[in-house]
Amino acid sequence: MGNVRSMGDELTTERLVVREWRPDDAAAALSIYGVDKVTRWLTPAMGQVADEAAMGLVLNAWIEAQPNMMPPRGRWAVERTEDGEVVGGLGIRLLPPYEEDLELSWQLRPDAWGNGYASEAGKALVSWAFTQEIDELFAVARPNNTRAIGTAKRIGMSWVGETDKYYNLRMQVFRIRPSDTAEQSR
């Protein structure tokens, strides 16, 4: 998977940097969170962002919240090292309604799909997250979101069932534990 550093400011993989969002990322973030092909799959907590000004407000909220989040929670930009382009976002947050389970989420701009960026960045974030005294991460996907389901599996997550407990939507649930990542690296 390449060299992964601790999440002080960023994680690096062979092709990507996972870093904190910056205010000047608004245009790049809008190419992810302002696109129906991406946002139609997001949970009701995150709708499609209308324009760059609105995206700037969302980013500012994420940036302000980040220092107060208990690791491994947070939101990060995924930047391609070859050209410095922000191609996606990653997050780890508490799943509603009980706020006990931690959700790993990923979003890529459509022109970056199919290159393995989500699974590469996701694996790096999972590896770092398991240094933060947690014992599992979940991902949820709508049953017909085949891209997200495929990414969850490539990250090494196992399907654990279907539920409507999260977001009051029927969701496929995937989980990964530290022992799963140890088995992958053998």
Image: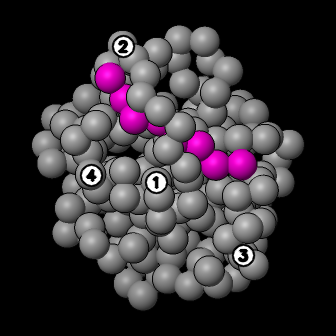
Q: Which mark is residue 152?
A: 1
**Callout 3: 10 Å neighbours few (<14), some, many (20+)?**
few
Q: CA distance from mark 3 to mark 4?
A: 25 Å
Residue 9 visible from this viewpoint: no
- Left or right: where 100 falls relative to 161: right
Check residue 185 in the rendering and tell me which mark sits there, or answer none: 3
Mark nearer the N terminus (3 vs 4): 4
Q: Is residue 73 above or below residue 76?
A: above
Sequence-first tag of 4 and 1: 4
Q: Position of residue 115 (x, y in %)?
A: 33, 77
Residue bounds of the magenta highlight = 170-177
Please report contact status of discs 1 and 3: CB closer than 8 Å, yes or no.
no
Q: Please give the name of the residue rendered at 41% of the width and 70% of the height, measured from the top-left corner.
A: 117
Residue 165 placement (x, y as % from top left): 46, 15
Q: Position of residue 9 (x, y in %)?
A: 69, 61
Q: Nearer the viewer, residue 173 or 89?
A: 173
Q: Residues within 10 Å of mark 1 (few under 14, many from 20)?
A: many
User: Residue 148: x percent and y percent?
Assistant: 35, 51
Instruction: Give the residue at x 67% y 71%.
Output: 184
The amino acid type, in three-letter code, at marker 1 is Ala
Instruction: Name the residue tied to disc 4.
Output: 146
Mark 2 lies on residue? 168
